[in-house]
Amino acid sequence: MLFPQHQRIAGFSRLRFGRHLLMKIRTAEFVTSCLTAEQYPKERLREVALLGRSNVGKSSALNSLLNRKGLAKVGKIPGKTQMINFFRVTLSGSKVEQFHMVDLPGYGYAKVPESVRRHWGPMVDTYLTSRDTLCGVVIFIDIRRVERSDVELIQWLKTLKHPMIVVATKVDKVTSGKRHAHLRQLREGLSLPESTDLLPYSSYTHEGRPEVIRAVQNLLVGNI
Ligand SMILES: Nc1nc2c(ncn2[C@@H]2O[C@H](COP(=O)(O)OP(=O)(O)OP(=O)(O)O)[C@@H](O)[C@H]2O)c(=O)[nH]1
Ligand SMILES: [Mg+2]
């Protein structure tokens, strides 16, 4: 099992830390934007990276999870995030007092010019394979559909063995009666084992925020 600290109950996960305090976000600030590994922050904080298709809502989720409007740039046009952006987050109620949340450029969006896409692959690949402070990845998938590029990303990440959680975004676009079916299709389409968290989320309504924060908390304290 990927996450021994998780217990599965009725198809969803309840975390063993369930009765413990949810970590509180005290401060969140932009640190730097990088293209190469030499530019990554020297400060060795634990890191959680946000990954997923362009336009799926990663930057919006970062702002909504950290409760800071406009911290990460959001765009209607895919390809808003084009560099690796590091944010330093200070916490209370957690064994980890500070960490980096890392907003990665999106992938696989057909409308993004090939010239722009070409350097994203190696940039994200270098980060995921070389950053030894990375302790987990949050993969964002649109709750309405799984794309081939999502499946390929998950397959590749499994080989890298980073602890992962999957967040099904834009849940506000799906009626509550249909959510369960969508989540089941996502789990099947992505061949996700039951032990991997699949959490519905909306950056517009903040639905799912405590669950996602708790899952991020578990990634951060996973191997302390
Ligand atoms: N309905 C709805 N729209 C959302 C949600 N999250 C993001 N969006 C919209 O989706 C679009 C893309 O959001 P971003 O947060 O920039 O997406 P991204 O994944 O960071 O995109 P890249 O930077 O291109 O990789 C914007 O128009 C957002 O307003 C959500 O939870 N619900
Ligand atoms: Mg973005």
Image (cartoon, grey):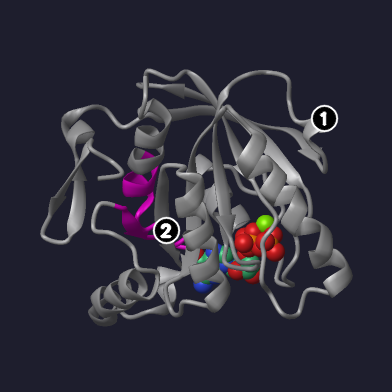
Earlier in the chain: of badge 2 and badge 1, it is: 1
Is 201 included in the stretch rendered in magenta?
Answer: yes
Q: Is residue 28 above or below residue 78?
A: above
Q: Quadrant of ligand 2?
A: bottom right
Q: Is residue 38 above or below residue 34?
A: above
- Counting every numbered tag in the picture gives 2
Q: Position of residue 177 (x, y in %)?
A: 23, 80
- Viewed as shown, does residue 151 lie left or right of 71? left
Q: Residue at x 33, y 59 (%)?
A: 198
Residue 180 can be seen, yes or no? yes
Q: Residue furthest right?
A: 115
Q: Residue furthest left?
A: 10
Which picture quadrant has residue 116? bottom right
Mark 1, residue position: 38
| Residue at the (57%, 67%) spot, across then down | 56
Q: Nearer the viewer, residue 193 or 184?
A: 193
Q: Secondary structure at mark 1?
A: helix
Q: Determine the image quadrant of residue 20.
A: top left
Q: Residues within 10 Å of mark 1 (few under 14, many from 20)?
A: few
User: Which stretch is magenta?
Assistant: 196-213
Instruction: Check mark 2 vs ligand 1: CB closer than 8 Å? yes or no.
Output: no
Q: Which is more foreground, mark 2 or mark 1?
A: 1
Pick the front one: 28 or 153: 153
Q: Which mark is residue 167?
A: 2
